[in-house]
Image (tube, rainbow, N blue to C red):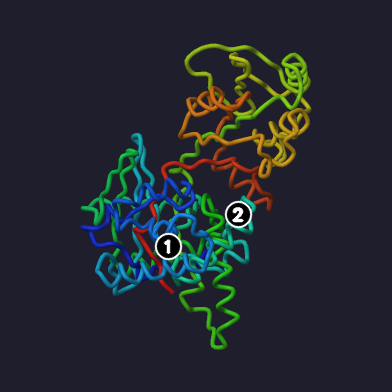
Amino acid sequence: MTVFRPFKAIHPTGEHAKDVAALPYDVMNEQEAREMTKDNPNTFLRIDRAEVNLPEGTDPHSKEVYEQARKLLDEKIEEGVYVQDKTPTFYLYRLTWQGRSQTGFVGLLSIEDYENDVIKKHEFTRAEKEEDRINHVNTTEAHTGPIFITYKAEDRLREIKEEFSKGEPLVSLTYDDGVTHEVWAIQDEAINREIIEIFENIPSVYIADGHHRAASAYRVGERRRKENPNHTGEEEYNYFLSVLFADEELYIMDYNRVIVDTNGLSDDEYMEKVKEKFDVEEIQGEDVRPSKKHEFTMFFKEKIYKLTPKEGTFDPEHPVHSLDADILQTNLLAPVLGIDDPRKSDRVDFIGGIRGVEGVTKRLGEDMEIGFLLYPVTISDLMRIADSGNVMPPKSTWFEPKLRSGLFIHRF
């Protein structure tokens, strides 16, 4: 049973929506964030990354930064940049990019469901990233970045989305990245009750992206439960902002790797090591990306190779060990290239699929010696791993398009 409920959203007024909506706080560094905010006083990035409002060199994790975020959010509400709904409402949020669309329900999930694993995870979180968002959420008393959630498609939910997205959207924004963002409100109490009831019969939902935000929302709610002697379970801190998309609509791109060197091996020694676990074939052509699972493309010394793992090098039945990222890590990156922990190694970097083959070849021309293209994982891979209680290797999934922050805020 999944608890999903409408809420009194705080959202930008129509005239401010385009300036407000911002990319997620963690897809850019501080300098990029400062550049993106310098001519826009209303962008939500000023709240999500409040250090941009303070002098350069300010510790981004200082109390001053989180207090600045709270102050700015309060000011923008006071100025009328944001307004709050008078009644609890579900929203539809559609993203359209490169000819395909995905439409999600915007509402609140329960921290109890997070705790009890009704909301399933597939990634480890890092303590320092979690702590940053805990401080941000706790100080602003708001969930400001929606968690990207997926569920197994359901017929009636599909019908509701089609019905309520026929009319004129409340918000329709298109940005330079080519992504169009549209929003509709579902202001029908009977339909809202139906949505709640349908999700009550869905046994699990899955975090697609936003593990740190979800963990932080849970930690803040847990803390406030303990601090409140009159806790009932109905307080707003027991719920967190989420957008729920059907699995059939989502698109995962490849997440590729570039390596700084051959770990002290000569070129010939390196290639011999590769051939111990992979069948190797030199390839040419315009599209050299892997065409299926368990196929890799390797760039090395201005040549391109197709690598196919040999029989017995991985367990095809294991939810994690059958993933291409794990196959590459276990058979090549760790034993040959000495990258035992890709989360911590400074000898590997990761290139999100949106940057394409060009992103890999660009780095090979700058500071890297070896590049690998991987075939994208699927939503069913993600769900299988989450259901098994395992986690994916780091940097396995790259979802596009990205949800914008600031279109919906949940204040508690």
Q: Quadrant of residue 381?
A: top right
Q: Is residue 131 left or right of residue 148?
A: right
Q: Which residue is mark 2?
A: 121
Residue 196's place in the image compared with 228, above or below, is above
- Nearer the observer: mark 2 or 1; the answer is 1
Percent from the top left, x then y, of residue 148? 47, 53
Q: Is residue 149 left or right of residue 318?
A: left
Residue 145 visible in the picture: no
Q: Which residue is mark 1?
A: 144
Residue 348 visible in the picture: yes
Residue depicted at x 74% and y 19%: 270
Residue 208's place in the image compared with 7, above or below, is above
SS at mark 1 in the image:
loop
Residue 207's place in the image compared with 334, above or below, is below
Residue type beneath disc 2:
Lys
Percent from the top left, x then y, of residue 253? 50, 36
Residue depicted at x 60% and y 27%: 368
Quadrant containing the N terminus is: bottom right
Nearer the N terminus, badge 2 or badge 1?
2
Q: Is residue 120 left or right of residue 354?
A: right
User: Total label count?
Assistant: 2
Q: Quadrant of residue 184?
A: bottom left
Quadrant containing the C terminus is: bottom left
Residue type beneath disc 1:
Thr
